[in-house]
Image (cartoon, rainbow, N blue to C red):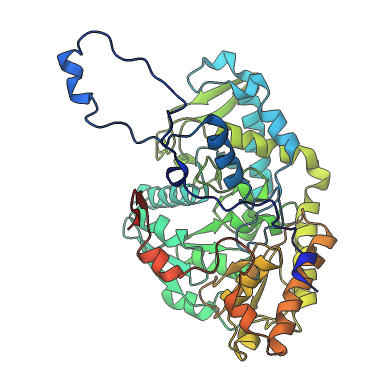
Amino acid sequence: MSANAYSATRGLQHEEPLLFEREHKAATAIALPGVSGEIAASLFAFVRKTPARIPGLSEPETVRHFVRLSQWNHGIETGFYPLGSCTMKYNPRVNEQIVRLPGLAYVHPEQPQDSVQGVLALLFELQQWLGEIAGLPHVTLQPAAGAHGELAGMMMIRAYHDARGDNKRRKVLVPDSAHGTNPASAVLAGLNTVEIKSAANGRIDLDALKANLGEDVAALMLTNPNTTGMFESDIGEICELVHRAGGLVYGDGANLNALVGIARPGDMGIDCLHINVHKTFATPHGGGGPGAGPVAVNDLLAPFLPVPRIEKNGDVYQIICEGEQSIGAVFGSLGQTGVLLRAAAYIAAFGCNDLHKIAEDAVLNANYVLARLKDVYHVPFPGLCKHECLLTDEWQERHGVKTLDIAKRLIDLGMHPMTVYFPLIVHGAMLIEPTETEAKETLDTFCDAMLEIAAQCEAGDTAILHDAPLLPFRRRLDETQAARKPVLVWNDSGFSS
């Protein structure tokens, strides 16, 4: 199948130089009035010695530049985004409409509590919903992202041990397939990490876990389903082993999309769970903007939750700012209210009767992709996956084609690549997560593109794969040099590093 079957024409896509490369010497479009009189001595140090470096462009030229750049972007609103481990699902527009209602959009963190009772009621209800979904009844909405939630959770676990006088527990066990933020969060909380190897089936090696349990273990951090897409079927025994050794179990909730409405981490024995609402509950994701990573805990950790928190006293919602054993504030207010309310809208749209359909469809879609591709791409851990499937380049590498070549060729075929080379424990990994929001037709288009690439390998037509992408304005970069020696500055003579 030709590339045009997957991607639209580039005919009206313009190559776009920098604004400084486009500037002309005509008068600038903005004329500022001069300063009358003498400049005060206190301001003299701020007077420009040289003219401001502003490109001499008109408003239409400037606006068109940025609009054309925006047309280069790929986002969840423009196409399929199959990143594994990241749950890049579509964000419903109704959520955006709701949070733009004046009574929600214009709330100020310092408003009197009696003037924001409606917002507090919504956030309190979200706390209750997340606690029920997690199977962990006590929730803080403060953390501003998943990694921030990890840090708050590890701080609570450390505070729990210290409050019991068990301050020798400073070791955190982290599976080798964990998200990279897990060990970083533990270290930031003043703890030490020890890597636990995975077994041949892609799950935690119980013998390795047992060998590392002891009186110095504060916690085990694990993701379930894990980053190979497999469910930790020994989760009950894993939690029991850690608890018996005196440690707690921290759950990375990044993959909650596979469980929501079906199974609750708290029921499995997990003590603390962060919830990426920008993943499971379809709030905006990525780009460095505001996120949210609420944390749910059991009764053991409840006294250590951050403050402020929302509590209900009769018909009145109150912001509680004190807690004798609380770890204190981890955010400047209650949390990223706009993001949290988007999550509340998404959960409300499904309701308790239909929330399970998220996980059911996500798991079905991932296994559909796996079923279509497993005969032409190597599957390192056979069997049903959960919300994401894992392939490798083992069979294509025999023809000199690697995961990066496959990912770059997908761009020519109109598809955003999957997550590549993660988890790190799997050579040539390709981690694919379709989520529940994609139609079968979209999945078939993606699978057809992957099958075409595999067929090109088998036919020996590998030159095109090594050269890909061929269609975008920017061809394949030397990514090592781009990372180590980025070109960040432009001047009249061109770029410099």
Residue 216 can be seen, yes or no: no
- Residue 176 pos. (x, y %): 48, 72
Left or right for 56, reference 73: left
- Residue 229 pos. (x, y %): 65, 69
Quick one: 77 or 337, which is closer to the camera?
77
Quick one: 239 or 385, which is closer to the camera?
385
Quick one: 466 or 372, which is closer to the camera?
466
Residue 421 can be seen, yes or no: yes
Q: How many numbered callouts?
A: 0
User: Residue at coordinates 47% horizontally, 63% vertically from top-left?
Assistant: 180
Vertical arrangement, residue 395 with respect to residue 406, above or below: below
Q: Quadrant of residue 236?
A: bottom right
User: Residue at coordinates 71% horizontally, 54% vertically from top-left?
Assistant: 79
- Residue 284 pos. (x, y %): 62, 43
Vertical arrangement, residue 40 with respect to residue 385, above or below: above
Quadrant in which the N terminus is drawn: bottom right
- Residue 279 pos. (x, y %): 63, 51
Quadrant in which the C terminus is drawn: bottom left
User: Residue at coordinates 61% horizontally, 24% vertically from top-left?
Assistant: 105
Q: Quadrant of residue 474?
A: bottom right
Residue furthest to the left:
41
